[in-house]
Amino acid sequence: MTAAPLRLGVNIDHVATVRNARGGQRPDPLRAAQLAIEAGADGITAHLREDRRHIHDDDMTRLKEAISKPLNFEMAATEQMLDVALKIRPHAVCLVPEKRTERTTEGGLDVVAGRDRLAPFVDQLHRAWIHVSLFIEPSEDAIAAAASLGAPVVEFHTGAWCHAIEVGDLTLAEREFERIKRATALASARGLECHAGHGLDYETARRVASLPPIVELNIGHFLVGEAVFVGLAESVKTMRRAMDEGRAAAAR
Ligand code: PXP
């Protein structure tokens, strides 16, 4: 099977985290977004949090106006965020949990218990021609609930897998990877577009790139952290290469 091209969405939230640590304008997340695009990013992801701890409203506006690639707006399902998204009209919105009551133990959006509350958000974004994705854990129940909500995209939370690798629990890591693999097959069989993200580094991105149904990875913290040592253009280029190598190995 030939896998579809794999897009890299670069999340620039933590450029804003550094800016906000001092206040003022620098480093500018828009400059980071433009640099990431020049280095090979296929899109830019930014999360407008309810407490505005990193990205601010006018960052989203500036990103939407200035970048040459799609903007993926991550947000909690609240009326206030919906108003901002409908005003900015990004290419895509990824609904993510912010409050503890909205998330599962693994950190994904609780689409099973929250189904009725989420439905009007998916519907209104959809009617505004915004591509909606739901950030869910790789489970069958979550996939079924996401499909019943009519969202065209699911983004699988890779945090549990990446964390297991980080703490050296390789048995758990393999189990988590198998869950992601199975979830991508189930979701794509239901016609859902599959994305993945959270906690990815070069090695985990390379591995997850080998799963043919996944067409987009959203990666932020690691790339911005590496940028301190090698520069953002270099960390994005190295990530792009790792993803392409993982994808090519899967096709062989
Ligand atoms: N995808 C989603 C939906 C996210 O909320 C985030 C940020 O938390 C990411 C991807 C990127 O995660 P990270 O910064 O760990 O790479």
Image (spheres, rainbow, N blue to C red):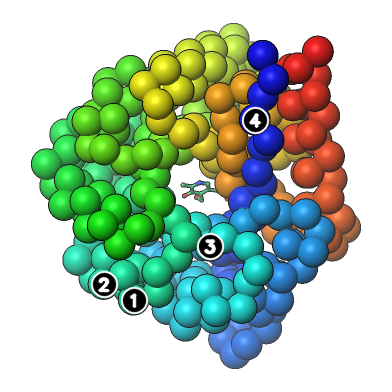
Circle on res. 83:
2
Q: Quadrant of residue 20?
A: bottom right
Residue kind at label 3, given as amino acid type: Leu
Foreground: disc 4 or disc 1: 4
The percent position of residue 49, horizontal first and vertical second, equals 39, 65
Whether residue 19 is visible here, answered yes or no, is no
Q: Secondary structure at mark 1?
A: helix
Mark 1 near mark 2, Cβ–Cβ under 8 Å?
A: yes
Q: Which residue is mark 3?
A: 71
Residue kind at label 1, given as amino acid type: Lys
State the CA–CA distance, disc 3 to disc 1. Answer: 14 Å
Residue kind at label 2, given as amino acid type: Asp
State the CA–CA distance, disc 2 to disc 3. Answer: 17 Å
Foreground: disc 2 or disc 4: 4
Q: Earlier in the sequence, mark 2 or mark 3?
A: 3
Circle on res. 4:
4
Q: Which residue is mark 1?
A: 87
